[in-house]
Image: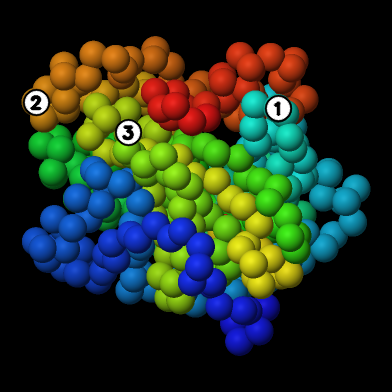
Amino acid sequence: MPATTIPPFPDNVPIQELVIIDYSLIRQGDENEIASLWKAATVRGFWYLKNHGVEGLFEPMFDMGRETMSLPFEEKMKYWQGNQGASFGYKAAGATTVDLDGSKDNAEFINISKDDALAYPQVAHVAYPSSVNARMESTIRPFVEACMEINSTMLEVFNARLGLPEGALAQHHPREQYSVSEARCIRVPPSPGSTKIAVGAHTDFGSLSFLANRLGGLQVMLPGETEWKYVKPLPGHVICNVGDALNIFSGGILKSSIHRVLPPPLAQSHYERWSLVYFTRPGDSVALRALVDQSSTISEAVAKDTDRDYDPGVTAAQWFARRQSKWRGNNQKGSMEDYLASRGTEHNRAVV
Ligand SMILES: O=C(O)CCC(=O)C(=O)O
Ligand SMILES: [Fe+2]
């Protein structure tokens, strides 16, 4: 969609201000910028990132998404993720629930595994539609590599500030170990006048998410807030956020905040909404628990927060599979328990 045809984001809806972090300064080790990133990640868990250098890959990634979503439904369903807790491949609209009443979501996904993108033409996990394969080497692998590098750089910043031994967080996200790290392209159909939730309220499962969207619709409810507010897409900027795994590793110091997707607001609701995410997630066998043995900052935070269990006794892969499978409408037997089992660190908040 040419940018000029998109109506501007309206100025009469509640907007969540977020700090803008300059990635080029983070790479240079600029102390002020590092302090701003640390504050953003520990207070809100969400921030904008500029000068990230990935902009040129967004349109080719959206081309892949557009071509994939326009395949016949039966063709797409050959790559269906299933209901067993996996997430690589195609997710049809309506496969997850968005609230306690069991309302269905409105978003199609194509998710491409980091391991498959790196291994191509070998298959690490699953096969993909031709629209994905055709761009695996030219577009998807470079996108995955670029996002991995950016997220690793931000993890290094957090590693130092958390007082962890050098490389501790990197060792929890090894490039070569299989993980549920993935790139995702999302399509939400035009929905004029609708308030139907497109992607239900959730915290991200992994460590860091890198998100590019053009139209509004993303809403956040940050720690201490009681109202949903839109995050306004800013040209040239991506939106980054902390996920549950990093929240747990850090003993709750890094915040994993709830968000959801509504139809784009007002005039923008007449347009298809496309978004693109890269999720950095821990290696599959990594134990999901606060790194109390490696940092006194983290052990002190855990000691103070007596309400939370920072050692749920699962690996990253088990945690992911539980949440992913319980989010599927087909696996919910109509009880609130199943829906709640799909939730993550937002459990300790009033809103699910
Ligand atoms: O599409 C968006 O703006 C956000 C998507 C999202 O939160 C997710 O896929 O986890
Ligand atoms: Fe998300």
For image coordinates 58% across by 67% down, the residue present is: 215
Q: Which residue is mark 2?
A: 296
CA separation in Å, label 3 and label 2: 16 Å
Q: Nearer the viewer, residue 273 or 28?
A: 273
Residue at disc 3, secondary structure: helix
For image coordinates 23% across by 14% down, the residue present is: 306
Amino acid type at circle 1 is Asp
CA separation in Å, label 2 and label 1: 43 Å
Taking the image as shown, residue 286 lies to the left or right of residue 130, namely left
For ligand 2, tell me if the residue under mark 2 lies within 8 Å. no
Judged by depth in the image, the label closer to the viewer, 3 or 2, is 3
Q: Residues within 10 Å of mark 1 (few under 14, many from 20)?
A: few
Taking the image as shown, residue 299 lies to the left or right of residue 136, namely left
Residue at disc 1, secondary structure: loop
Residue at disc 2, secondary structure: helix
Compared with residue 303, is residue 160 higher up or lower down, i.e. above or below? below
Q: The N terminus appears in which quarter of the rendering?
A: bottom right
Q: Which residue is mark 3?
A: 247
